[in-house]
Image (spheres, rainbow, N blue to C red):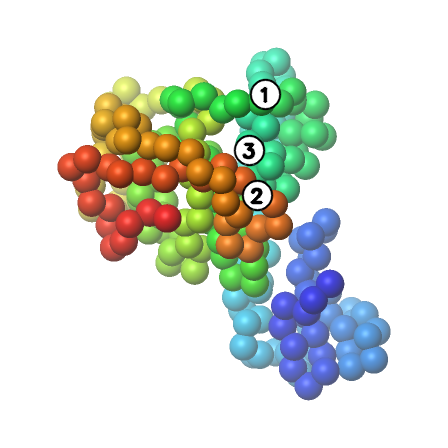
């Protein structure tokens, strides 16, 4: 595995299986704790933040997969292909995969983060632009979007966004927005990913997303 952080021959690596940071000395020997040479090294704080984000994401995937398994629900194969954490969780829970995602329901939003890591979250349509802003604060950039056809497990009848998204200024989006009519599929690999995934590209009538256009 390529070192995520290196200084004076000492390295720190974030493992994919255990999501643990492994430290090694100049001779390649694994160390029990972070060496003084890496303390404060550029990228160390960022690597720890990525680990926390991915650990929380793994737990969320596992929790949702167990809910689907209990309900006897299916999940789109594109979700497993977009994110190894979803693939791991869906396989472990025994959730069947469908060949094609639907056009409505929750959207799968992929983010490319520091050190080449990616993750894919399931979000309601109204939440996507707000979550993009929040993720960018931690250097996670939007890198793909597609509809899953999965129903929102907790629809908000009052149209109220979940925290922390509701703390952001409002945008001109709604669940009835016409942007689906101008959406189209394209196949490309997102940054930091090793597999090709479906990507949702759009032209959104009457709406300009905050800061920049969605990829």
Mark whose residue sits in front, 2 or 3:
2
Q: Residue 77, image x and y in percent?
A: 59, 28
The reply, left or right, for residue 11 in relation to residue 215 is: right
Q: Which of these two is toward me, 153 or 171?
A: 171
User: From mark 2 to mark 1, how far is it between C-alphas?
Assistant: 17 Å
Q: Which residue is mark 1?
A: 98
Tags 2 and 3 touching, CB below 8 Å: no
Residue extending farthest to the top is 72
User: From mark 3 to mark 1, how far is it between C-alphas?
Assistant: 10 Å
Q: In which image quadrant can residue 185 be found?
A: top left
Q: Nearer the N terminus, badge 2 or badge 1?
A: 1
Q: Residue 70, image x and y in percent?
A: 62, 17
Q: Nearer the N terminus, badge 2 or badge 3?
A: 3
Q: Which mark is residue 196?
A: 2
Q: Residue at x 19, y 40 (%)?
A: 207
**Counting other residues with Cα less than 10 Å from the Cα at mark 3, is it few (<14), some (14-19), or many (20 or more)?**
many
Q: In which image quadrant can residue 48 be found?
A: bottom right
Tags 3 and 1 touching, CB below 8 Å: no
The reply, left or right, for residue 1 in relation to residue 167 is: right
Mark whose residue sits in front, 2 or 1:
2
Q: Residue at x 70, y 57 (%)?
A: 15
Q: Nearer the N terminus, badge 3 or badge 1?
A: 3
Q: Is residue 127 visible?
A: yes
Q: Is residue 159 visible?
A: no
């Amino acid at each position: 595995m390529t070192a995520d952080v290196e200084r004076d021959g000492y390295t720190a690596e974030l493992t994919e299986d255990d999501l643990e940071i492994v430290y090694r000395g100049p001779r390649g020997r694994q160390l029990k704790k972070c060496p003084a040479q890496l303390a404060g090294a550029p990228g160390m704080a960022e690597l720890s933040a990525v680990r926390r984000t991915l650990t929380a994401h793994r737990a969320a995937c596992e929790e949702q997969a167990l809910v689907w398994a209990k309900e006897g629900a299916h999940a789109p194969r594109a979700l497993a292909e977009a994110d190894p954490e979803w693939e791991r969780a869906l396989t472990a829970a025994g959730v069947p995969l469908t060949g094609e995602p639907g056009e409505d329901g929750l959207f799968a939003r992929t983010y490319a983060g520091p050190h080449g890591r990616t993750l894919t979250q399931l979000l309601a349509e109204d939440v996507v632009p707000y979550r993009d802003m929040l993720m960018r604060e931690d250097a996670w950039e939007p890198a793909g979007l597609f509809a899953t056809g999965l129903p929102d497990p907790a629809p908000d009848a009052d149209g109220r966004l979940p925290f922390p998204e509701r703390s952001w200024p409002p945008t001109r989006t709604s669940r009835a927005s016409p942007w689906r009519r101008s959406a189209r599929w394209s196949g490309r690999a997102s940054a930091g990913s090793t597999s090709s995934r479906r990507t949702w590209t759009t032209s959104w009538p009457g709406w300009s997303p905050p800061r920049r256009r969605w990829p």
